[in-house]
Image (cartoon, helix red, strand yellow):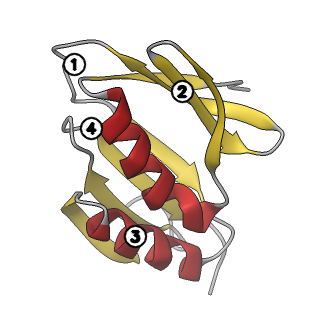
Amino acid sequence: MIDHISLLVSNLDASKRFYEAALAPLGYAVLMQFPGVAGLGVAPEADFWLGERSPADGGRHVAFRARSRAEVDAFHAAALAAGAKDNGAPGLRPQYHASYYGAFVLDPDGNNIEAVCHDPA
């Protein structure tokens, strides 16, 4: 079981604003901050960490579990409104399994961020 994950970002303040907005539909918020680092999660656990390093190398993939397909849709809309680039609109991905419903965006550093619901409709 994974306890937490970290991404390197080139601008912590900008990425923190982006992730606060994009992950709000999933219940995530900034829970902890230290110089150059921010931890987000669903209270009380910070399980997604951002660390500032320039240049950040991007190219990572992180998938957040959503409780419903509506949350996947809300994540995608919130991420695009926060400045993400679309990398796959919400929809079924039957190549993974019959009920795999996901959406993908690229964050400000080019990381592929996904929200996914595995439950049938």
Query: How far separated are the C-alphas under marks 4 and 3?
Result: 16 Å
From the image, tell me which residue sits under label 4. Answer: 111
Q: Are marks 2 and 3 in contact (CB under 8 Å)?
A: no
The tag on residue 56 is 1
Q: Choose the circle earlier in sequence order: 4 or 3.
A: 3
User: Residue at position x 27%, y 46% from top?
Assistant: 107
Classify residue 63 as left or right of residue 48. left
Amino acid type shown at disc 4: Asn
Q: Are marks 1 and 3 in contact (CB under 8 Å)?
A: no
From the image, tell me which residue sits under label 3. Answer: 78
- The quarter of the picture where residue 109 lies is top left
Report crowding for label 2: few under 14, some 14 to 19, many 20 or more residues within 10 A (C-alpha). Answer: many
Report crowding for label 1: few under 14, some 14 to 19, many 20 or more residues within 10 A (C-alpha). Answer: some
From the image, tell me which residue sits under label 2. Answer: 38
Q: Are marks 1 and 4 in contact (CB under 8 Å)?
A: no
- Which marked residue is nearer to the observer: mark 2 or mark 1? 2
Query: Which element type, helix, strand or loop, lies under badge 3?
Result: helix
Query: How far separated are the C-alphas under marks 1 and 3?
Result: 23 Å
Residue 51 appearing in the image: yes
Query: Which element type, helix, strand or loop, lies under badge 1?
Result: loop
User: Residue at position x 28%, y 56% from top?
Assistant: 105
Q: Nearer the viewer, residue 19 or 116?
A: 19
The tag on residue 41 is none
Query: How far separated are the C-alphas under marks 2 and 3?
Result: 20 Å
2 shown above or below 21: above
Classify residue 30 as left or right of residue 116. right
Quadrant where the image shows the N terminus: top right
